Image: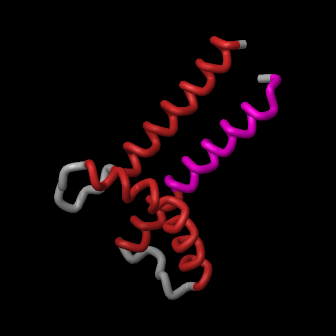
Amino acid sequence: MSNPFLWLVLTVIDLYMWVVIIGVVLSWLVAFSVVNTSNRFVYMVGDITHRLTEPALGRIRRFLPNLGGIDISPIVLIIGLIFLQRLIIWGFYEVG
């Protein structure tokens, strides 16, 4: 990968995937009372991940069926981001 723009785009997508994963794990930890949102750091991390991921996850949730208490929108988002990465790499190497 000699193109710095391609590296930057792929790195941003990777970082966003990690933000989604951190948000999911943190929501599980809060739901099972492992961590408490009254802790300022936990609240800040949860708020940041929610603000960064909710626009994308909210759009995905509109199209998914109701599965009870199971939210698969983060899985759909991560699969979509991986697809986008592969599409960018494939398009770059097809053109270049």
The image shows residue 44 at horizontal and vertical percentages of 59, 77
The image shows residue 1 at horizontal and vertical percentages of 77, 23
Q: Nearer the viewer, residue 49 or 62?
A: 62
Q: Residue furthest bottom?
A: 38
Q: Main secondary structure of the magenta part?
A: helix
In the rendered structure, the answer to whether residue 95 lies left or right of residue 29 reads right
The image shows residue 77 at horizontal and vertical percentages of 43, 45
Q: Residue at x 40, y 51 (%)?
A: 74
Q: Residue at x 63, y 48 (%)?
A: 15
Q: Name which quarter of the figure residue 54 lies in.
A: bottom left
* Residue 6 in the image: above or below residue 38: above
Q: Residue at x 45, y 38 (%)?
A: 80
Q: Name which quarter of the figure residue 33 lies in.
A: bottom left
* Residue 23 in the image: above or below residue 9: below
The span picked out in magenta is 2-21
Q: Quadrant of the C terminus?
A: top right
Task: Report the number of discs.
Answer: 0
Question: Is residue 95 within the magenta segment?
Answer: no
The image shows residue 71 at horizontal and vertical percentages of 30, 56
* Residue 58 in the image: above or below residue 31: above
Q: Name which quarter of the figure residue 48 lies in.
A: bottom right
Question: Is residue 15 within the magenta segment?
Answer: yes
Q: Nearer the viewer, residue 96 or 73?
A: 96
* Residue 81 in the image: above or below residue 40: above
Colour scheme shown: secondary structure
In the rendered structure, the answer to whether residue 8 lies left or right of residue 58 reads right
Q: Residue at x 37, y 54 (%)?
A: 59
